[in-house]
């Protein structure tokens, strides 16, 4: 059995509301059953004009983001699309079909399709809807701020007073479920939660390392992600300038690299 898996979307935190292709809101166009299969068949034929047409199964699923997958199993193509895409313009669905099939068969991705999808993906309305869906559908494991050795609420309050004049509202703070080393911390805007890896909750972890990690995530509260055209700016110039104000930045980053 041959199985191939690929995902069109690299950032699961990307947002969305009524799917639109540009800043202007087009009317939703729910396609008749079988029409999405037709779109994928047309894009398959454009990419592979002489290859036999495989059987395809394309379904919309209630997912927590725009994550979309394509698999080739025993000669049949299986595609799962987020139901957030059901009302997308047909041109956007053509772009998605092209990108997924191009990735599956390792073909170059057409720049026009790629730009059309990115404009849709980063539109304000799509961003709002995806954020809403993530907050309502997505389950968030919350273990709380109280660790064995460190209390994240206490660390946050101290940093808030020291660097932000107590102007930041405290989000949900929690230790991670596992001792993660790949993702040491992150801010989840959909759930207004900062998660810190449990790997830091031990006596050998210097307080400045935990303070720096939490300070970095607090900067995401002060400097939210901005979208410029088809690009997302997560760590802009103002963010980086504030990050350099942390007095033990060099020691903290060196400690993180040793984990």
Image (tube, grey):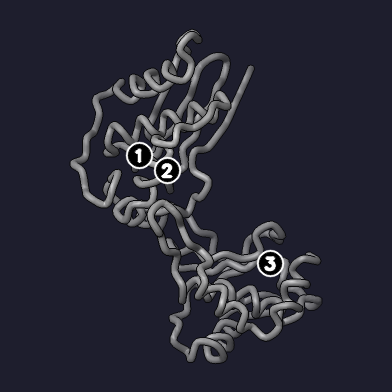
Depth check: give the residue in front, 10 or 203. Answer: 10
Depth check: give the residue in front, 181 or 42. Answer: 42
Q: Around disc 2, counting alpha carbons within 10 Å, would you say few (fewer than 14), some (14 to 19), or many (20 or more)?
A: some
Indicate the position of residue 175 as horizontal and vertical percent values: 62, 68
**Residue lying at 55% horizontally and 88% vertically, measured from the top left:** 163
Indicate the position of residue 106 as horizontal and vertical percent values: 58, 27
Secondary structure under the numbered disc 1 in the rendered image: helix
Whether residue 200 sits left or right of residue 139 in the image: it is right
Indicate the position of residue 26 as horizontal and vertical percent values: 20, 43
Q: Around disc 1, counting alpha carbons within 10 Å, would you say few (fewer than 14), some (14 to 19), or many (20 or more)?
A: some
Tag 1 residue: 83
* Relative vertical location of residue 150 with respect to residue 57 in this rendering, above or below: below
Q: Which of marks 1 and 3 is nearer the N terminus?
A: 1
Secondary structure under the numbered disc 3 in the rendered image: helix
Tag 3 residue: 198
Q: In which quarter of the image is the C terminus?
A: bottom right
Tag 2 residue: 63
Q: State whether residue 19 appears in this view.
A: no
**Residue lying at 44% horizontally and 36% vertically, measured from the top left:** 111
């Amino acid at each position: 059995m041959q199985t191939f898996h690929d995902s069109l979307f690299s950032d699961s935190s990307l947002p969305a509301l009524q799917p639109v292709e540009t800043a202007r809101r087009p009317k939703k166009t729910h396609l008749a059953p079988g029409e999405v299969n037709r779109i994928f068949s047309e894009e398959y034929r454009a990419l592979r004009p002489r290859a036999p047409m495989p059987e395809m199964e394309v379904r919309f699923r209630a997912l927590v983001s725009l994550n979309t997958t394509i698999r080739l199993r025993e000669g049949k193509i299986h595609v799962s699309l987020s139901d957030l895409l059901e009302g997308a313009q047909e041109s956007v669905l053509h772009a998605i079909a092209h990108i997924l099939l191009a990735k599956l068969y390792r073909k170059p991705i057409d720049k026009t399709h790629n730009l059309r999808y990115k404009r849709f993906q980063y539109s304000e309305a799509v961003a709002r809807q995806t954020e809403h869906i993530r907050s309502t559908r997505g389950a968030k494991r919350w273990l709380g701020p109280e660790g064995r050795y460190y209390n994240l609420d206490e660390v946050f309050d101290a940093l808030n007073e020291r660097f932000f004049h107590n102007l930041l509202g405290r989000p949900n703070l929690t230790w991670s479920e596992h001792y993660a080393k790949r993702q040491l911390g992150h801010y989840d805007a959909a759930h207004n939660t900062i998660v810190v890896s449990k790997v830091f909750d031990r006596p050998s972890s210097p307080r400045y390392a935990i303070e720096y990690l939490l300070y970095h995530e607090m900067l995401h509260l002060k400097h939210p992600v901005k979208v410029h055209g088809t690009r997302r700016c997560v760590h802009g110039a103002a963010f980086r300038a504030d990050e350099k104000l942390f007095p033990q930045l060099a020691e903290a980053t060196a400690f993180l690299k040793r984990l």
